[in-house]
Image: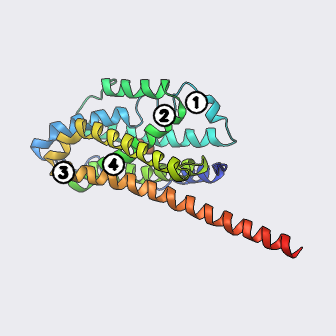
Amino acid sequence: MKTQLNTAKWIAFFRHNQHNRVEPRWDAPIKVLPEARLLLEQSLKEFQLGDGGGPASLIAWNVMKYRKSQPGLDEVIDLWFEEEKEHSRLLGGLLLRFGVIPIEDHWSFSLFCFLRKVLGVKFELQILTLTELSSTAYYWLLLRHCEDPAVRDVCSLILRDEAGHVAFQNDRLHCSGTPGKGLKRLLWRAQFLLSGSVAAMVLWISHGKCLRTMGVTTARFYHEAWRQFGRFMFKLDVRAKQEERSQVTGSALERTMAASA
Ligand SMILES: [Fe+2]
Ligand SMILES: [Fe+2]
C-alpha cells in the first residue's frame, strides 16, 4: 500500500546530520603500503568523481514530476545531494593529500549518467540505491584494511552519511508500496538482487585491484555487498509485514465496533 513519505522527518534528519562533523586528519603522516599507493589513488580519483562529483542531483528526464510529487520532497532530495557533494569534497581532500590531480570525466561515469538520464527517475533512484549499498561495502572494507588516518576518517564520515541515505531509500521504497506481495514481491527481490550484483561487479572490476593489495579477497567483497543488499531487503520486508499486521488489526477492530453498534 502506498503512503506519503514523511518529508519533514527527513528534512530534520539531514539538517541534524550537518552538525558535529570533525575534519579528517589531513596532516597526519601518510600510512599506505607502497604497493597499494598508486591503485588507491586511482580508485579515489574515480570515487571522487562518482560519489558527489559531476551533476550531484537527480538527472532523469522526468525528475521534475517526481520532485514535485509531494510537499517537502524537493528539499529532502537537495539535502541528500548536499551530502553527496560533501563526499566528493572529502575524497578531493584525500587526492590533495596524496598530490593527485582529480579527474573530470571517466567513461564509466558518463555511461552511468547517461543511463540515469534516459531511463527515468524510478530507474535512477534504484541505481543510486544499489550504488550506495555497494559503495558502503567498499568504504567499509577500506576503513578496515587501510591504515592511513585521513582515509579512515573520510570513510567513517561517508559511512555515517550513507547509513542515513540507505535508511532514506528504504523508507522511500516502503512508502511507494514496494516490494508488494506474492509473486510481485519475489520478482521485485530477484531484479533488485540481480541489479545489485551487477553494480557490485562493476565496482569490483574497477576497484578490486586496489582493495586486493590491502588484503581484501573477491569473496570478502561480495559477501559484504550482499550483506548490505540482504539487510536492506530484510528491513523492507519487516516494515511491510508490520503494516500488514496493523491493517489486519485495524479491520478486525472496525468489524467488532460495527457488530457492537
Ligand atoms: Fe556518497
Ligand atoms: Fe549516498
Q: Is residue 124 left or right of residue 12?
A: left
Q: Tell me the distance, in whole angstroms, between the alpha carbons under discs 1 and 4.
A: 30 Å
Q: Earlier in the sequence, mark 3 or mark 4?
A: 4
Q: Which residue is mark 2?
A: 124
Q: Earlier in the sequence, mark 1 or mark 4?
A: 1
Is residue 227 placed above or below 121 in the rendered structure?
below
Of residues 2 and 30, the one nearer the viewer is 2
Residues tagged 1 and 2 counted as in contact (Cβ below 8 A):
yes
**Which label sits on residue 63?**
1
Q: Residues within 10 Å of mark 3 (few under 14, many from 20)?
A: some
- The quadrant the C terminus occupies is bottom right
Q: Amino acid at mark 3?
A: Val
Q: Tell me the distance, in whole angstroms, between the alpha carbons under discs 1 and 2.
A: 9 Å
Residues tagged 1 and 4 counted as in contact (Cβ below 8 A):
no
In the picture as drawn, the residue positioned furthest to the left comes out as 35
Q: Which residue is mark 3?
A: 216
Q: Which residue is mark 4?
A: 154
Image coordinates for residue 115, horizontal then vertical, percent: 43, 26
Q: Is residue 88 left or right of residue 126?
A: left
Q: Tell me the distance, in whole angstroms, between the alpha carbons under discs 3 and 4.
A: 19 Å
Q: Residues within 10 Å of mark 4 (few under 14, many from 20)?
A: many
Of residues 246 and 203, the one nearer the viewer is 246
Q: Amino acid at mark 2?
A: Glu
